[in-house]
Image (cartoon, rainbow, N blue to C red):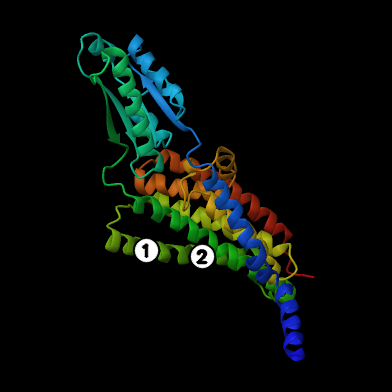
Amino acid sequence: MNRTFADLKAFGLQYLRSRTGFFFALIFPVILILVFGAIFSNIGTQKINLPVQDLDDSFWSQQYIRILNQTNVFNVEMVSANVNFDEYIKDELLVLALQIPQGFGQAINSSQTANITLKGDPTNSNFNIGVGAANAAAEQLSFIITGGSRLVFVQSENIGSSQFKFIDFFIPGMIAFTALTTPLFSMSAICAEYRSRGFFKLLGSTPLKKSEWLAAKILWYIVLMIASIMVMMLVGMAVFNARLTITPMAIVIVAAGVFLFTSLGMFIGTFVSNPESASAIANAIGFPMMFLSGIFFQLEAMPEYLQVIAKGMPLTYMAQGLRSTMSLGNEVQAAIDLGILLVIGVIFFVIAAKAMSWKGK
């Protein structure tokens, strides 16, 4: 029994000396509790942002907007009547928007049916909530006007293609997820191991330059990611009938994402003393980014402060850019996200390249 306890103590101390084991045993569960707790604790209490375009600007349209505000479900944001509403929805990547047509008030005054259009993405968790609340407001306005009979109706329209499904939202996110995990975790460990074991000194004795070594790693992960994309697309189309397009912009975004996360992995591995420390730091950075960047959970379902944090994470822009070009055909938004990825990637690459030394320590 004494030998059992002695071995238990020795093994326990050895395990706790492993930063990776310590991270997954004690720190990672805490991160999951904090992240998922923050995401789900306020579900049902957050107001839904609802852009509204009032083309009628009549007494009755203003009354309907007033009732919408009183439901405490929406944050109503008015959109100018001069704006092309469909283009506005596409450019802003909206998941829910409402339009009151011209002649709405005149139809009510003539005791005719008056329709309101609610445009939304049915794959979004807020869509059904929005439809229900908009219909409730229409019923209340009808009661005010007629005292009972229904006069105002809400017609819902899908934003984008009617064939757009959850899998079409999920696969681009998984591509971004893979572009994060593969280069970030492996490059941080590789750089730390090369540094601690003196491999960089050996590389310094060869004609190979730092820039060439870094470029080779980035190119390898790009090739690996293209192969991964092909596999994910084939599985998605064969099993779930996914409708996605691999556009030139999508390939460029993937390359930019790989460049960024490879550079981030180099950045981590350059400043830590051993591979285990590098893995623990990469996990501490990577896992919160996975859950807060809209890969598995839509950003709209999160509290506002988490949405602000998500906007500071590069994975958010990669996932958003891929969905924009592969699912929605919004190349303008995809180009904006690409620019953000490139700027962040260059910053990490320059810092890591300057800090990395063939001489080592």
At 29% from the left edge and 63% from the top edge, which residue is drawn?
Answer: 239
**Quarter of the figure with the N terminus:** bottom right
Give neighbour class at mark 2: few <14, some 14-19, many 20+ (Cα, 10 Å): some
The part of the image, by quadrant, that contains residue 113 is top left
- Horizontal side of 147 relative to 312 (left or right) equals left
- Residue 221 versus residue 48 in the image, above or below: below
- Residue 83 versus residue 261 in the image, above or below: above
Q: Which residue is mark 1?
A: 230
Q: Nearer the viewer, residue 360 or 158?
A: 158
Spot occupied by residue 288 in the image (x, y as percentages of width and height): 59, 54
Q: Nearer the viewer, residue 101 or 331?
A: 101
At 72% from the left edge and 88% from the top edge, which residue is drawn?
Answer: 4
- Horizontal side of 334 relative to 292 (left or right) equals left
Dots 1 and 2: beta carbons under 8 Å? no
Amino acid type of the residue tagged 1 in the rendering: Met
Q: Is residue 272 visible?
A: yes
Spot occupied by residue 293 in the image (x, y as percentages of width and height): 52, 49
- Horizontal side of 260 relative to 232 (left or right) equals right
Amino acid type of the residue tagged 2 in the rendering: Tyr
The part of the image, by quadrant, that contains residue 50 is top left
Disc 1 is placed on an element classified as helix
Disc 2 is placed on an element classified as helix
Find the residue positioned furthest to the right: 361
Spot occupied by residue 303 in the image (x, y as percentages of width and height): 55, 40
The part of the image, by quadrant, that contains residue 124 is top left
At 58% from the left edge and 51% from the top edge, which residue is drawn?
Answer: 35
**Quarter of the figure with the C terminus:** bottom right
Q: CA distance from mark 1 to mark 2?
A: 14 Å
Spot occupied by residue 347 in the image (x, y as percentages of width and height): 64, 49
Q: Say the numbered circle drawn on residue 221.
A: 2
